[in-house]
Image: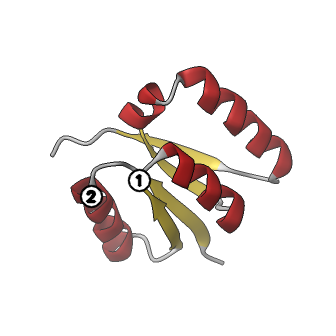
Amino acid sequence: MALKTLIIDDEPDAVNFIHSLITEYCPQLEIAGTARSVKEARKMIIKTQPDLLFLDVEMLMAAALIYWIVFLKKLLMSFLLLHLIITQSML
């Protein structure tokens, strides 16, 4: 069973890079979508109910860390299991 995966990053090159790595090396991951803003991420998370998030650390900080903590806590309480990978673009 594939893990539904959501990529959250405001840099298109970073999204494309992560997407290509997942496609090539992680057949067990299904890309459910991408989001390039906090508002879009929130909608996509609720819509797709992913198992795994790739979240850009700069977006995490720019959107106020406390907001993400509260939002992710609510998500963790509503989903059975959610994995989070925090990324940083070096492009």
Tag shown at residue 12: 2
Is residue 71 shown left or right of residue 34?
right
Which residue is at 29% across, 70% downward?
Answer: 20
Which residue is at 45% across, 48% downward?
Answer: 37
Numbered disc 2: secondary structure: helix
Q: Are marks 1 and 2 in contact (CB under 8 Å)?
A: yes
Q: Residues within 10 Å of mark 2 (few under 14, many from 20)?
A: few
**Amino acid type, label 2:** Pro
Q: How is the image coloured?
A: secondary structure
| Vertical relation: 13 (above or below) 75 | below
Most distant residue in the left direction: 91
Q: Residues within 10 Å of mark 1 (few under 14, many from 20)?
A: some
Distance CA(mark 1)–CA(mark 2) = 8 Å
Position in image of residue 29 (x %, y %): 51, 70
Label whose residue precedes the other's in the sequence (1 or 2): 2
Which residue is at 45% across, 77% downward?
Answer: 27
Residue toward you, 44 or 51 = 44
Position in image of residue 7 (x %, y %): 45, 57
Position in image of residue 38 (x %, y %): 51, 44
Q: Which quadrant holds the N terminus?
A: bottom right
Most distant residue in the front direction: 39
**Amino acid type, label 1:** Arg
Is residue 74 shown left or right of residue 90?
right
| Vertical relation: 15 (above or below) 66 | below
Position in image of residue 31 (x %, y %): 49, 71
Tag shown at residue 36: 1
Q: Give the total of numbered labels.
A: 2
Tag shown at residue 82: none
Numbered disc 1: secondary structure: loop
Which residue is at 75% across, 52% downward?
Answer: 81
